[in-house]
Image: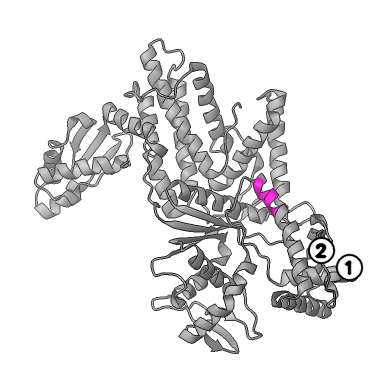
């Protein structure tokens, strides 16, 4: 269904035409003076220059052509503004259509289009740490949002599973257990089905190996192991499969705990087979050129204020790098899924990398001319003191530890305040903690750094996840006491607080469209905070269940029920859900 601003803009444009003026002057905007009006049109001011008459004359002529039934206030004010307030009948009709339409009538702007959201970016053999929080939950929210807007969505974790880290692990494991059959080049039997390490041992092997990179002898072994793995050495491939199985199982468990789910668990290794043909094609086309022994793709374009370094395709030693893998991954995605858009969610410090890769992809013809490529570069999460988030011993905090700490903090509040019966504490705690964690992050603009403040994020008041959840739970409680509410129609607003709530509800579709276009889940957070505020103001100023007029009471119930459904839909897009009680 059309957004409310589109409807009243069309009505205003028709009024301009009927008054003898060009329809283009009839653009309506949300008022910047809500104390005076709800919507405004300033077109008469611009039209006055073209038609050489006073703006107020044009405004008065246009106002005379508007349908008074649609507005509770229409006025032309000096020097030529047109101020509007919508009528209760107009709002009632619009919200009733929202209530009865699928997905509240939100236009499916992505229908028929496919988007790949590349997020997560975990490396195998390494535990998820706090640096993985933002790409995971921002990417998940953007994927859910695009799906809601009609896109065919494919979320790909894009694992780091094929570089030097694999060689480091193999080299370290060989030093620890040289007797394993994987290191015997003459072994021809079946390799063990069980991995020769646990996930905890694996998470010790990699940092130990990484610390030895400065040792020339060990570094040579690791590089040689990486080369032989990628060339297909049988024993190393078997070890790699063990590493993948053990690590991915653990990664899935941790992502599941965060309610983050990927449609595809592909990695750099899946892109590797596409590299030879891709590089050969780029050389043949002349897109890739030799530079100091390396093959590079010049990507600087006319109009650049600063020169963009060339995208390195193949290093002088013949090895591929991250850019090569990212380009080959695009080749695979275009062949398999033909996406209309590829969205990458990583640290903003990779902005230059993706600018180079995107330009190289277009220059080489990997993507179509109309394929959208976007990098959502996110900021970092710091501690409450504004300094980089570290453990007490100065290490990087594991993501599961952060989630556990938040959960413990919320559980204490739930128990101390006796929010729910003892047997409901755990389920309620989990939902509030996840809402606090995700909303605390997502309410910030993705590109901005922010400070993680557990006490503020878990507060039940203010712009927080628990405040949004409490609002939903409060409405659920009222509806449960009322009884059957699902089919109650929307009524005209009975007071100013009902009207304010209705106006807030109408902003749902515009908020989602803005969030999609800007790749900014924080715009959804801003919207539901405004909506929750309108709900609570209405609740405090209106007797709902105590209203003696049953028809009036039914109108109140249908209105808060619609608000609840929109709030629940919105938090689902953000990746969390509300408990039954708080």
Q: Main secondary structure of the magenta part?
A: helix
State whether residue 514 is above or below residue 87: below
Q: What element does badge 1 sit on?
A: helix
Percent coordinates x, y for residue 23 in the rendering: 16, 49
Percent coordinates x, y for residue 241 in the rendering: 74, 64
User: Which of the 4 image quadrants contains residue 176?
Assistant: bottom right
- Magenta region, residue range: 250-256
Q: Which is nearer the eye, 17 or 171?
A: 171
Residue 377 visible in the picture: yes
State whether residue 461 is above or below residue 546: below
State whether residue 79 is above or below residue 387: above
The residue lying at 72 percent from left, 32 percent from top is: 412
Indicate yes or no whether the magenta region holds residue 578.
Answer: no
Q: From the viewer's perspective, is 410 left or right of 542?
A: right
The residue lying at 53 percent from left, 40 percent from top is: 572
Disc 1 and disc 2 in contact, CB within 8 angstroms: yes
Mark 2, residue position: 205
What is the count of numbered marks? 2
Task: Tell me the tag on residue 39.
Answer: none
How crowded pointer 1 is (Cα within 10 Å; few <14, some 14-19, many 20+) is rated as few
Q: From the viewer's perspective, is 295 left or right of 416?
A: left
Task: Tell me the tag on residue 176.
Answer: 1
| Cα separation between marks 1 and 2 | 9 Å
Percent coordinates x, y for residue 14 in the rendering: 16, 43
Percent coordinates x, y for residue 487 in the rendering: 40, 24
Q: What element does badge 2 sit on?
A: helix
């Amino acid at each position: 269904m059309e957004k409310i601003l589109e409807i009243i803009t069309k009505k205003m444009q028709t009024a301009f035409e009927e008054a003898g003026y060009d329809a283009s002057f009839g653009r309506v905007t949300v008022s910047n003076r809500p104390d005076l009006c709800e919507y405004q049109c300033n077109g008469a001011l611009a039209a006055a220059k073209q038609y050489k008459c006073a703006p107020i004359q044009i405004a008065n002529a246009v106002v005379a052509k508007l349908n008074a039934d649609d507005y509770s206030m229409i006025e032309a004010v000096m020097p030529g503004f047109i101020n509007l307030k919508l009528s209760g009948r107009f709002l009632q009709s619009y919200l009733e259509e929202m209530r009865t339409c699928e997905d509240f009538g939100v236009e499916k702007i992505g229908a028929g289009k496919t988007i790949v959201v590349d997020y997560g970016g975990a490396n195998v053999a390494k535990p998820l740490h706090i640096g993985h929080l933002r790409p995971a939950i921002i990417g998940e929210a953007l994927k859910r949002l695009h799906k809601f807007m009609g896109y065919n969505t494919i979320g790909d974790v894009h694992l780091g599973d094929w570089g030097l880290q694999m060689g480091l692990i193999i080299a370290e494991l060989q030093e620890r257990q040289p007797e394993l059959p994987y290191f015997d080049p003459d072994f021809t039997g079946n390799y063990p089905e069980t991995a020769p390490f646990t996930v905890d041992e694996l998470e010790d092997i990699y940092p130990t190996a990484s610390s030895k990179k400065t040792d020339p002898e060990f570094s040579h072994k690791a590089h040689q192991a990486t080369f032989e793995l990628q060339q297909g050495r049988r024993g190393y491939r078997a070890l790699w499969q063990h590493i993948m199985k053990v690590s991915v199982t653990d990664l899935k468990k941790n992502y599941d705990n965060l309610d983050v789910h990927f449609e595809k668990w592909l990695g750099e290794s899946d892109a590797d087979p596409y590299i030879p043909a891709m590089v050969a094609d780029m050389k043949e086309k002349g897109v890739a050129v030799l530079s100091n022994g390396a093959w590079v793709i010049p990507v600087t374009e006319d109009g650049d204020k600063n020169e963009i370094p060339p995208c390195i395709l193949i290093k002088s030693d013949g090895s591929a790098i991250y850019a090569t893998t990212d380009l080959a991954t695009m080749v695979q995605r275009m062949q398999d899924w033909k996406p209309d858009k590829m969205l990458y969610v990583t640290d903003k410090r990779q902005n230059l990398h993706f600018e180079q890769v995107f330009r190289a992809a277009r220059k080489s013809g990997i993507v179509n001319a109309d394929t959208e490529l976007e990098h959502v570069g996110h900021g970092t999460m710091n501690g409450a003191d504004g300094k980089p988030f570290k453990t007490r011993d100065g290490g990087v905090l594991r993501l599961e530890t952060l989630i556990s700490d938040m959960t413990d903090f919320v559980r204490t509040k739930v128990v101390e305040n006796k929010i729910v019966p003892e047997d409901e504490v755990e389920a309620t705690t989990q939902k509030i903690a996840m809402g606090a964690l995700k909303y605390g992050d997502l309410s910030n603009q993705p590109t901005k750094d922010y400070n993680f403040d557990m006490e503020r994020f878990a507060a039940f008041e203010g712009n927080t996840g628990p405040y949004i959840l409490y609002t939903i739970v409060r409405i659920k409680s009222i509806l449960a006491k009322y009884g059957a509410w699902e089919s109650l129609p929307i009524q005209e607003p009975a007071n100013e607080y009902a009207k304010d709530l209705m106006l807030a509800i109408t902003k749902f579709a515009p908020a989602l469209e803005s969030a999609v276009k800007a790749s900014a889940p924080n715009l959804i957070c801003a919207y539901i905070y405004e909506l929750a505020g309108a709900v609570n103001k209405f609740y405090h100023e209106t007797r709902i269940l105590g209203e003696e007029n049953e028809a009036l009471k039914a109108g109140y119930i249908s209105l808060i029920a619609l608000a609840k459904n929109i709030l629940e839909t919105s938090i689902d897009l953000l990746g969390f859900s509300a408990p039954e009680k708080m």
